[in-house]
Amino acid sequence: MKRRTLDVLFSAVGLGLAVLLLVLGMVMTSNANFAKTYVAEQLGEQKITFKTAETLTDAEKQSACLVKYAGQPLLTGKQAECYANDFIGLHLRATPDAKTYAELGDVQSGLRTQITAATAANSPTLPALQKQLADTTALRETQFKGETLRGLLLTSFGFSVFGVKGEQAATVAYLAAALLALLSIAGLIHAFKTPKDQTFAAPDKPNTRPETKPLVGV
């Protein structure tokens, strides 16, 4: 095969891959921009604002991100993660016994069983059990709201991470496309500088020189 033909062939394949990577990078950039815009719009509709620095409690001040975002509107995935874990999560853990919504459901079931038994036995502990059940029910509703909002915010954070990863993938695709394009252009330049009749890995020509016989008797 002619060396020029081989250079042109490899250069064409390289340019094709460069175009493919360029298109892939543009798609990933579009997805990343959509993720950023979508997360910002959805979080903006919640109209959540971080507490100002002077209103943070001592426990809240231990969070670097709550101090960093103090007084700012919640609009990004990283802010959503901070608010979910360091603000909502902090207050959920500060509830009595730090029980979750699901765990409080078991407590409710146990109290209802005790109330049924106390009612049947006309026990004097009935009013106390009823109050405890009412307090547990109210606490469970609070936990439900907090855990639901926390889950939604963390979902937004997760969605934003896909946007960041898409942006990184797009950058890699652009760099690879640029490198392939440069190599392909260099290959084309080399192809047109190569003589047309030069072949690639041509076999060595056999030795056609006549064999000389040694002179006898000299």
Image: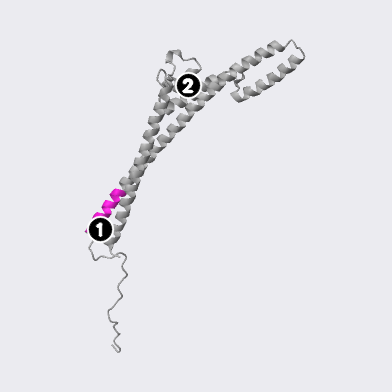
Question: Which structural element holds mark 2?
Answer: loop
Toward the bottom, the furthest residue is 217
Image quadrant in which you'd find residue 50: top left
**Is 124 displayed left or right of 66 in the figure?**
right
* Residue 81, magenta (yes or no): no
Q: Quadrant of the N terminus?
A: bottom left
Looking at the image, is mark 2 or mark 1 nearer the viewer? 1
Range shown magenta? 180-192
Residue at x 32% of width, y 52% of height:
14
Please tell me in which quadrant of the rendered image residue 39 appears: top left
Q: Quadrant of the C terminus?
A: bottom left
Q: Which residue is mark 1?
A: 191
Q: Would you identify the image quadrant in which residue 167 lies?
A: top left
Would you place residue 31 above or below residue 106 in this image? below
Q: First in sequence, mark 2 or 1: give its number.
A: 2
Look at mark 2 in the image and give the residue it sits on.
63
Residue 42 at x, y percent in the picture: 42, 26
Q: Give the residue at x 28% y 62%.
A: 3
Seen from the viewer's position, the closer of residues 8 and 121 is: 121
Tell me if residue 121 comes above or below residue 32 in the rendering: above
User: In 3D space, how far apart are the residues under numbered discs 2 and 1 (Cα atoms)?
Assistant: 62 Å
Q: Is residue 137 visible?
A: yes
Return the x and y of residue 153 as percentages of the image width and height.
47, 26
Q: Position of residue 122 (x, y in %)?
A: 76, 12
- Residue 73 percent across, percent down from the top left: 40, 20
Left or right of 141 in this view: 76? left
- What residue is at 71 percent from the left and 20 percent from the top? 113
> Badge 2 local density, few (<14 within 10 Å), some, or many (20+)?
some
